[in-house]
Amino acid sequence: MRTLALHRLGRAAARVGPPKTAPYPAPYGAYAPNVVANPSYRAKYRLSLWIRPNVQAEGATVTVYLSEVGGKAPGANTAERTVTLRRGWQFVALAGRVRARKRAFLSISIRQMANIFPSDAFYIDGVKLQLAG
């Protein structure tokens, strides 16, 4: 969900929370599939974003994943980072190299998997994925 009330960069941020109809505790997050098509083997990518919790989610942990899929090898995480959510905006950056040949796509996901309550939410802003030299 887009919100204009709370943002770090620009005019809006994305609010991410568990679905209202989900049984609890239900993992939740944001997923951006197929953000890079046919990434080159061993190419290095850098993912960065800003994240902040609502009051109820302070102290929760989220994990940010950059994943690769397709080709003969099973899907794998190119990079991942777990972050404890603190009050205010936090900058998160991670980098990794494509681990297998002939991958079809890179995807991004940001997930809270444990200690979840119905009123939890976090906000993300300024998501950037770059090919790093």
Image: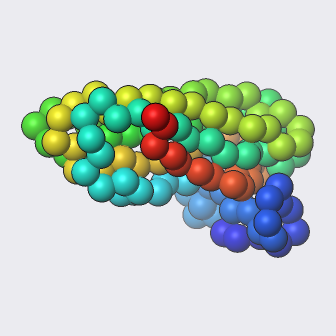
Q: Which residue is farthest left?
A: 72
Q: Residue 11: which quarter of the image?
A: bottom right
Q: Nearer the viewer, residue 42 or 87?
A: 42
Q: Is residue 97 above or below residue 11?
A: above
Q: Is residue 17 visible?
A: no
Q: Nearer the viewer, residue 71 or 132?
A: 132
Residue 101 in sight from this viewpoint: yes
Screen quadrant of the N terminus: bottom right
Residue 26 spot, x, y in % from top left? 56, 46
Most distant residue in the front direction: 133
Give the vertical position of 84 relative to 55 (above or below): above
Count of number-bearing discs? 0
Answer with the quarter of the image where residue 56 lies: top right
Judged left or right of residue 73, residue 132 is right
30 or 11, nearer to the observer: 11
Describe residue 56's horizontal placement relative to residue 106 as left or right.
right
| Residue displayed at 17% across by 35% down | 101
Indicate the position of residue 35 as horizontal and vertical percent values. 41, 56
Residue under the point 79% across and 30% down: 59
Residue 66 lies, in percent from the top left, at 45, 39
Q: Is residue 101 left or right of residue 115?
A: left
Residue at 46% across, 43% down: 131
Kindly indicate the quadrant of the structure image that contains residue 86: top right
**Residue 23 horizontal/vertical position (percent):** 56, 52
At a point 79% along the width and 66% down the height, the residue shown is: 10
